Amino acid sequence: MTVTTVLVVDDEPIARRRLIRMLRRLESVLVVGEAADVKQAVAEAERLKPDLLLLDIQIPGGDGFSVLERLGASAPQIIFVTAYDQHALRAFEVEAVDYVTKPVDPVRLTKAIERAIVAIAARASSCKVEELTTTVHSLRETLAEVTIPNPALWIRHRSGLLRVEIEDIIYARAERDYVQLHLTEKICLYPENMTALETKLAPYGFVRIHRSTLVRLKAIQKIQRGVDGRLTLQISDGTRLTVGRTYASGIRNRLSV
């Protein structure tokens, strides 16, 4: 049986680990490495020469397209991982191997991998620079026109439902069986656990900084290191939040600090 080697590129450690766990369930796939930014992705791709890149679009040091441009003719087949709505990307499916939207569904990922394996076999180890360049430019131009719709969460409130705009959420903190949503002007209780909420909010610029805390990246105003070495974030509303040790490296990567 032919094994397809894969390099996973995503700046979020949790997202990388989740993708790797999914890939390891597939007998025809071997994960040979991982990377968190453009520079590391290019270096690992050149060193490991994988058959396939599972490539996040939004990564530090540029973007996923920067990785393709730097690799040029040596670029392997690509499956893009993106927070953009899948329907907005259908126009690219003819030129790209596939796209997987976040949060990644295991069944959808498996289908994308199957398509990639077929493409790799058909490619016969050649890659035309002209085709790659055309695809990159086409992707960039169309993605520049794509806007994420104004999303919201619906919360039971008294005898009805209350609409909470995601753009109004500054941070979220676990509170027993609920999650406190700290908005610009009030606090709401959301009846889900932190992991479920993280899945919903991650595509909109939120990052986990603690097992019980999720924060909007754009709301972070200041970062300080305490005497114990822990990072503390000052948020736009004046709140100070402590970063869990296991999440510190991910925060530094996301903020490029």
Image (cartoon, helix red, strand yellow):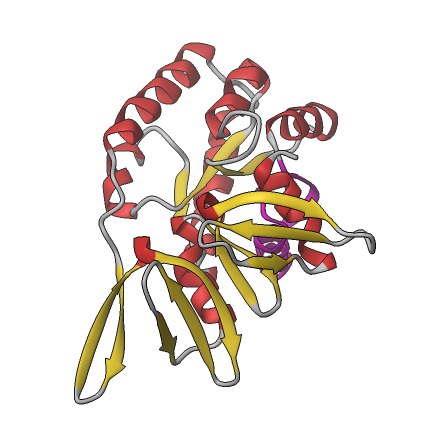
Toward the top, the furthest residue is 130
Residue 180 is drawn in which quadrant? bottom left
Give residue 11's position: percent from left, percent from top.
59, 42
Residue at position x 26%, y 61% in the image: 152
The residue sitting at 45% across, 70% down in the picture is: 196
State the residue at coordinates (47%, 63%).
198
- Residue 70, compared with residue 216, is above or below; it is above
Tell me if 4 is positioned left or right of 173 in this view: right
Q: Is residue 212 above or below residue 223?
A: below
Give the residue at the far right of this rendering: 228
Report which quarter residue 222 is drawn in: top right
In the rendered structure, the answer to whether residue 138 lies left or right of residue 12 reads: left
x and y percent of residue 76 in the render? 56, 28
Foreground of the two, 26 or 213: 213
In the image, residue 227 lies at what x, y percent? 82, 52
Task: Please tell me whether residue 21 belongs to the stretch shown in magenta.
Answer: yes
Vertical position of residue 122 compared to residue 191: above or below:
above
Viewer-proximal residue among 101 and 246: 246
In the rendered image, residue 23 lying in the magenta stretch gets the answer: yes
- Label total for image: 0
Query: Is 57 or 246 nearer to us in this picture?
Result: 246
Q: Residue furthest bottom?
A: 159
Q: Position of residue 177 (x, y in %)?
A: 48, 85
Which residues make up the magenta segment? 10-36
Residue found 74% across the figure and 26% down from its top:
47
Q: Can you see residue 3?
A: no
Residue 84 visible at all: yes
Quadrant occupied by the C terminus: top right
Q: Is residue 98 left or right of residue 52?
A: left
